[in-house]
Image: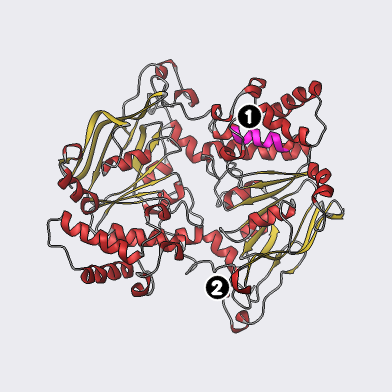
Amino acid sequence: MTAPLLQVVGLSKHYALKGGRSLRAVDGVDLSLHAGESLGLVGESGCGKSTVARLVLRLIPPSAGAIRFDGRDIAPLKEDALRPLRRDMQIVFQNPHSALNPRRTVFASVAEPLVVQGIADAASTQARVTDLLREVGLPESFLWRFPHELSGGQKQRVCIARALALAPKLLVLDEPTSALDVSVQAQILDFLQDLRGRLGLAYLFISHNLAVVRQVCDRVAVMYLGRIVEEGPVEAMFRAPRHPYTRALIASVLPPRPSGLPEAPLAGDVPNAADIPAGCRFAPRCPLRMDRCSRDDPALAGSDAHRVACWAA
Amino acid sequence: MNALLEIGGYRLAFDGFEGRAHVLDGIDLTVEEGETVGIVGETGCGKSVLARSVARLVEMPPGRVLGGGIRFAGQDVFAMDQRALARLRGHGVAMIFQDPMTYLNPVFSIGAQMVDVIRAHDRAEGKARRSRAAARAAAAELLGAVRLPDPGRLLDRYPHELSGGMRQRVLIAMALTGTPRLLVADEPTTALDVTIQAQVLRLIAELVAARGLTLMLISHDLGVIGALCRRVVVMYAGTIVEDATAETLFGAPRHPYTRGLLAAVPDLARPGHRALAIPGHIPNLLDPPPGCRFHPRCPLAIARCAVEKPLLREVDGRRVACHRAEEVAA
């Protein structure tokens, strides 16, 4: 097997708090992503999934750990050394309404990465931007429009065109359809699938919506309080989830039909990342808790394909 | 059966700089006491503004009623004086909203806010206002009723000290203070995580059953609607397009928009099923399409659809607004 495009080992991001305490937003994450593959990163708010995205792109520096991108550890690199690498890794944010400058045309927004990287010249840029718009299914007439003239789905397509401008290898999609209506979400998901096939992109797809992840991802990693608790191929994860938290997440999904009430699968709230429980961090809410769980912190273990961090699994 | 809520020919517009937006275009909806009705639709369909209209919470102006009206328990909501309105809000209709933090005052404790609400309801109902101590005891009881642990201590805490799920429970407790008959819940779990959503939906269902409330649940999420509601109303661009029992609506939808909406939702239980998009996008309500507002996106549109607005009519045991409803296979 070829080396992964992205390999993250022991990645952590801690924020210092008053009184010598720290908030452990990401706390020892390992993951890998091959070229052309789509990895879903799921979990509830505050689990650290968006922080992982920002670390992987080196938008923020990690507290510890290695981020090997294309064979090179980018964790210790400074801003100057990172700039050429940014061509290969781009991000699409959740809310396209705030990710576009309202005073700039579609052309100006999509051309910006080319300008920043110094590869824009007046003659070729317009042709390149027109190509990019075509790539995302928008007509040339959109070049001179402003964001307020576009629908939410069209804005998200513009954001994707901008992310594609530098022909990246890795696209981080941070809840790319959560701000969109379902009828538009389906368009964007279809289009993202098609795009990955055609351009051989790797996706790190962050979402809280398991049904969406099942549709667009090859593998899924489930995060809880800064840690990956289970990771594996999408089919195995949804057919036979092994971590009690993964099971609870799946059980919480409400199907689009008369279903009766879901049993609330978990009691209580997610603990504060500044005060992570000892032992397994999921233990206080876990239906399968044993004595050992509140003492020993389980590591992600199992076959390479399907790994789980649980003493009871 | 008694009609608790009667909305007839209700047309609402907003006047703005760019013109007049026709946000509700002739809404006819009757809700019987004890029903659980879900109102589902996408951005801009008018579901939230309809919900707010029920408690007359739409600012006028810029809002303007162009026709029709709303009656709650037989009384014309728009004809109510301030006293009657104060009684309607809370005692007749109680509301909970999407973002609980917005509806709690960050500088007052939970107890202080609940005591104020309880005493205000006493006055609105024409009773003697309870003492602060008595109101505080009632507040603690309500917090217990929404299953919040240690209500006595919770009363002294501030909104920022609570999680999103706890805040929504506090607002549900406040909604119960006036012993309402109709609970209007506008996207009550949209801001919450899925495991917390399940807890809050369960609580709402239990309170509705135990207190005999009528529920009007507004959501964009067909899963939430399917979990809580026996009857489902689908809205599109300010109109009701279909109104049926949950079984009928999910099982045999007749309106092309309902069918499109159901096909667009990714379904965890059917992994082979690929979510299908509805082409196009929602219309601009400043200048809505003539005839059926869905016709520019409709796979079944014919010439008639662009000129004649389809009326909501009985077809095959449900109400549907489509000229071709009979042809849509069940």
Q: Residue A313 placed where, x, y %?
A: 64, 72
Instruction: Tell which residue pokes out farthest to the bottom in this image.
Output: A291
Q: Residue at x 73, y 27 (%)?
A: A129
Which residue does the numbered mark 1 point to in the structure image?
Answer: A104
Q: Residue B271 placed where, x, y %?
A: 60, 49
Residue A17, quarter of picture = bottom right
Q: Earlier in the sequence, mark 2 or mark 1?
A: 1
Q: Which residues are magenta?
A: A155-163
Report if residue A8 is visible in the image: yes
Q: Residue at x 27, y 42 (%)?
A: B54
Residue B40 or residue A69, whichever sits in front: A69
Q: Is residue B310 above or below residue A44?
A: above
Residue type pointed to by label 2: Cys
Q: Residue at x 49, y 51 (%)?
A: A255
Residue A87, quarter of picture = top right
Chain under label 1? Answer: A
Report if residue A1 is visible in the image: no
Which residue does the numbered mark 2 point to in the structure image?
Answer: A286
Neighbor class of circle 1 (other Cα within 10 Å; few <14, some 14-19, many 20+) is: some
